[in-house]
Every structure is written in C-alpha cells, then in structure tokens.
Amino acid sequence: MSQQPAEGFEPLSYQVTLPLSRQTLGMVAGLIRGRRRRLRSRWRKATPAGQALVVLAVLRHDQRLADIGGGQGVSASTVRRWVLEVIGLLAARARRLGRVLRKLAGRGAVVVLVDGTLVKTRRRTGKANRAHYNGKHKHHGLVVLALTDEDGRLVWVSAALAGRTADITAARRLRLRDRLHEHGLTPAADKGFHGWHKDVRDTRDCESCGGSCAQVVLTPYKAEAKRPLTKAQKQANAAFSGMRCAVEGGFAALKAWRILTTLRLNPRHATTLLRALLVLTQHEQSVRDTAQPATT
C-alpha cells in the first residue's frame, strides 16, 4: 500500500459477501487461465481464481483499487492491470448486433425494447468538458443505448457515446432502426425517441421486404401545447408504459455492477467495460434460469 499505518499498528482486514454465483467465478477464471496458457505465463502473483475474485469484487462493489490490493498484497496498478485484462477477455465474448437480431428473429420475436441511459463520469477537461456534459441529467457522462426482449433481459448494448448525445441521435448514428427492420423487428421506445417516427417513410422498393412496406416505430402519444391527450390516448400510453417497463429491469441488472455508479476508469475503456458487464449479466441470468426448477 502507498500509505503505511502508524508504527505499532497493523492494517485490519474484513470480509465482504459477493452476490455472484460460483459458475461466474469459474467462467472468468477459465478465461484467465486460457490467456495465461496462450502467453505461456510461468508465474503470477495470484491464481486465475484469485485474480477473477478480485476483478469481480471491483466490478460489483466498485472497491477502491488500493484497498483491495492491500488485502491481496499487490499494488493498485496491478489490480488495475488485472481489471483491464479481464474486461478485455469478457468483451470479446459479447455478441454483435447482427447476431443478436438474427437470434431474436429466429426465436419469433416481433418487438424489441429500446432505451438509453447515462453512465456518470468525472468532470472532463478541455474540449471534452462540454461534449460530455448531459443537460438532461446535469452531469458529465457517457450515453449508452440498450436492447432488451419483452421480458427485460439485456441482449445488446451500444458503444459509449459523448454525454451530450441525445438518445434518438445515438440511435440514428447507429442506424438502429434500419438494422431492426432488416430482421423484421419493431422497436418500442419512450417519448425521448418520439421524433424517430418521422424518419419512417412508405417505401415502394424495400430491400428487406422485396417490395412495398411501411416501417413502424412504436412510441407513446405526446401532448402538444393546444392538443391535450384524449382519454383513449392516455389509456394507450398507460398500456404502452406497462409493456416498456421491462426495459428498466434490464438497466437495473446492468447498473447493479456498481463500477457504473460513477465511472473512474479512462473513458476509452468504457465500451469494453460495458460489453464485459453485459456478458457477466447474461451469464448470471442463465445460471439463475438453470437453477430454477422447471414448472409443469
């Protein structure tokens, strides 16, 4: 540790519960073990399982690197190197958008829930200060889009974009609507994507449909200055919100990894980190589903 205790005093240690399955620990340890085998690493300070446990503690509890490193007898820079190594290995296992959409379409899905969130960061310096300031949340951060199925399970997260980027702008940059339409999927989004439907045009020669089609984007009704919502529109919005509330559960599962509370890693690692956390979240969900007894 960089700061040694006063003379005559020894540092205290304590135990913390990590709410993750042993299968997740084994999966991460297996990735580390395979990398060491490829690199022909002869000796490390920690075993693959030990390194995996430290990294998962950092990701789940946002443990300070110097604190957890002191308990393991390593420096903060070593823990940071372990974290970057593991999130790179996990992010490589994340499914890309095309494969995710093909799987959803093959499963018979019709609607995909779309939403965005802000991952808070520290204040930036220079030109990046204004670019990463989000006026809606009044905080610096990074904007991330996510897709979930009807049950609220995360299936894909986008790359991290500058905090001032609106959700609808991010979706347009990623050509998300066109990618969904190619696989016959309809996006369902909140009022922040209300202008998205204006991009939709009746196309007579659609490459995806092979003929005439009309692309659809599901968004709730939005009241205007002199046009309040009717009772039927309010009821439709309530039903629509009931369907879309599942996407909040997906973001809650992602942000249960407290390292996203306020990101202190360099923002250039944000996309890799988000994809790594997506893989861990999906693995935990699959383990939980396997452990549940089948209902008859």
Image (spheres, helix red, strand yellow):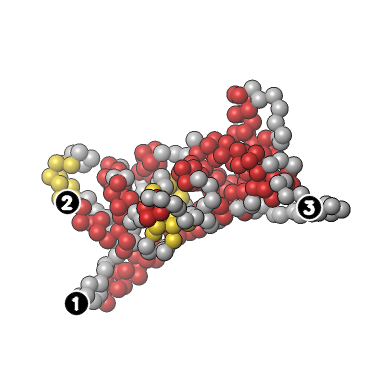
Measured as percent of width and height from the top left, residue 26 is found at 65, 39
User: Is any atom of residue 113 visible in this view?
Assistant: no
> How far is the residue under mark 1 from the one under mark 3?
68 Å
Disc 3 target residue: 5
Disc 2 target residue: 201
Which quadrant of the figure has residue 85? top right
In primary-sequence order, the first of circles 2 and 1 is 2
In primary-sequence order, the first of circles 3 and 2 is 3
**52 and 265: which is toward the camera:** 265
> How far is the residue under mark 2 from the one under mark 1?
27 Å
State yes or no: discs 1 and 3 in contact (Cβ < 8 Å): no
Which quadrant of the figure has residue 38? top right
Disc 1 target residue: 226
Name the residue: 76% across, 54% down: 14
Name the residue: 25% across, 75% down: 229
Q: Amino acid at mark 1?
A: Lys
Q: Amino acid at mark 2?
A: Arg
